[in-house]
Amino acid sequence: MSDKYKIVLNYIKDLSVEIPSPEALIISRNNIQKYEMKVNISSKPLKLKMVEVTTTLKYTDPKNNKHKAFFEIQYATVIDILDSQLKKKDLEKIILCDLQIEIYPELEKKFLAILRNSGFPNLEFGQKIDFEKLYKERLN
């Protein structure tokens, strides 16, 4: 646990699993290793020094394939800012990096369970998301 923030709660805010047809499921199963994970992080201030952070994962076929599946999860985390002297830059790092590193294992577990139960029983995500690297790239 950080001395700068604490997680108050987290939950699945929105979920989309789109498999338009049996043919799309079969083709997607055959191409699922080519799918790519995209991540987007947004935040909005709440009352009482709290911030809602929404981490969106999209797992999609990068090709313009007519028969494909689409998966998206929006995972909301509400954090309480414990350090009232926190600078904007420090808060940005918490939201984009530190918090993501903390919540991602559980988010990935939940997302994988949903996808596996949606017709992709042996699915494993390839490369893990390196939030530290993404944050440093954003600074440059």
Image: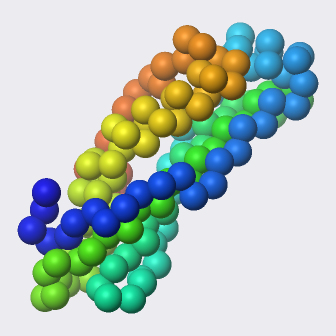
Q: Quadrant of residue 114?
A: top right
**29 sits left or right of 42 in the view:** right
Where residue 36 appears, x then y in whole percent? Answer: 58, 33
**48 sits left or right of 35 in the view:** left
Q: Quadrant of residue 48?
A: bottom left
Where residue 91 appears, x then y in whole percent? Answer: 26, 75
Q: Quadrant of residue 106?
A: top left
**75 sits left or right of 134 in the view:** right
Task: Say which quadrant the N terminus sits in.
Answer: bottom left
Q: Is residue 85 visible?
A: yes
Task: Say which quadrant the C terminus sits in.
Answer: bottom left
**38 sits left or right of 43 in the view:** right
Tell me which residue sits at (42%, 84%) in the image.
46
Q: Nearer the viewer, residue 113 or 30?
A: 113
Q: Is residue 21 above or below residue 49?
A: above
Q: Is residue 32 above or below residue 132?
A: above
Where residue 136 appears, x then y in whole percent? Answer: 27, 56
Q: Nearer the viewer, residue 79 or 41?
A: 79
Q: Nearer the viewer, residue 11 or 51?
A: 11
Q: Is residue 66 above or below residue 96?
A: above
Q: Is residue 139 visible?
A: no
Tell me which residue sits at (55%, 11%) in the image.
122
Where residue 130 appears, x then y in whole percent? Answer: 32, 42
Tell me which residue sits at (60%, 14%) in the image.
121
Tell me which residue sits at (38%, 68%) in the image.
78
Q: Nearer the viewer, residue 12 or 62?
A: 12
Circle count: 0
